[in-house]
Image (cartoon, grey):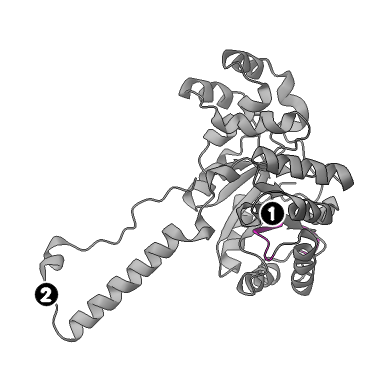
Amino acid sequence: MVRYGNTGRTLSSSRAREEPRGWQSTVECFRCCRFLTTYCKRIFSPMTTFPRPLEIGLGTGSLQGEMCRNTVEQALDIGYRHIDTAQIYGNESDIGDALRSAKVNKESTFVATKLHSKNLGHEDVLASAKHSRDRLSVEAIDLLYIHWPAHTYDPYETMAAFDLLRERDVIKRIGVSNFTCELLTEAHAATTHSVFANQIEMHPFLQQKPLQKYAVENDIILVAHTPFAGGAVFNDPTLRSVANDYDSSIAQITLAWLLEKENVAVIPRSRGPHLKENHTASNLSLTEDTIRTIDSIDREVRVVDYEFAPWN
């Protein structure tokens, strides 16, 4: 999903024809090796990729206990590999149980969770992340988010702790959630590692165009939560018309439209028959006219909004 442009590092033809001698040869070899090492790390590192099977994940915010375990197991059987949770959901242990009993290779799964905004002090980050890892029954958390930039969040103190978690292999990727462009820039400046993803509310009525642009320019994945706008998409006549044209559900059209955006993944909350329906949305390909039609219904209306949110 993340697209790479020109590396900006080329050797001129005249320089390429030169045959350096002595110390010059050593310097040129060093420069070339350093460039190739950096380039290959960027292209092949798991930190800069988001494979297609992970583009549609399972949001578990409303699931607990047996329902959570059964839903996660069913989702994994269908083909989901990206499971999203949070400390505040209270279901990390349930998801860990489901992962242990699932009939899939554990290495093929991608598990993301979020730190509660009251656990963002330096020592709290280190301790609570380990507790989440243990509850999830994973060797390392694939993606750990800051749930909200609120309460105990301090960019330098919090991000320094996330850096330590990376270096200690407690987590594999650093994520943030509900961050504005300004907060993303601040977080980047505060960490020695890159921010992999920003999980935000995103749907046809809140298209987050400034954040879309920022994500593409800075190689960040946008993970769309609340993709159905709290159910509002199901009553929209434009989306209903498009769904009829494609002989698909409004949910599938909404998810397919999000996936047409560069650097975007989605985590709908699903259960029962909707699990398979939503998962197959990645097979839909929308025309440019259809994409423009859905683009035109943006209302900049939020469903998830709190007084402590950074945009308030």
Tag of residue 295: none
Range shown magenta = 139-152
Crowd class of label 1 (few under 14; some 14 to 19; many from 20; radius 10 Å)? many
The kind of residue tagged 1 is Ala
Name the residue rendered at 63%, 56% in the picture.
183
x, y percent for residue 132:
78, 62
Residue named by callout 1 = 112
Q: Is residue 147 magenta?
A: yes
The relative height of residue 145 versus residue 36 in the rendered view (above or below) is above
Residue 298 seen in the figure: no
First in sequence: mark 2 vs mark 1: 2
Amino acid type, mark 2: Glu
Q: CA distance from mark 2 to mark 1?
A: 51 Å
The answer to whether 29 appears left or right of 280 in the picture is left
- Image-based side of 120 in relation to 212, left or right: right
Identify residue for label 2.
19
Q: Which residue is nearer to you in this view: 87 or 305?
A: 87
SS type, badge 1: strand
* Extreme residue toward the front, this view: 103
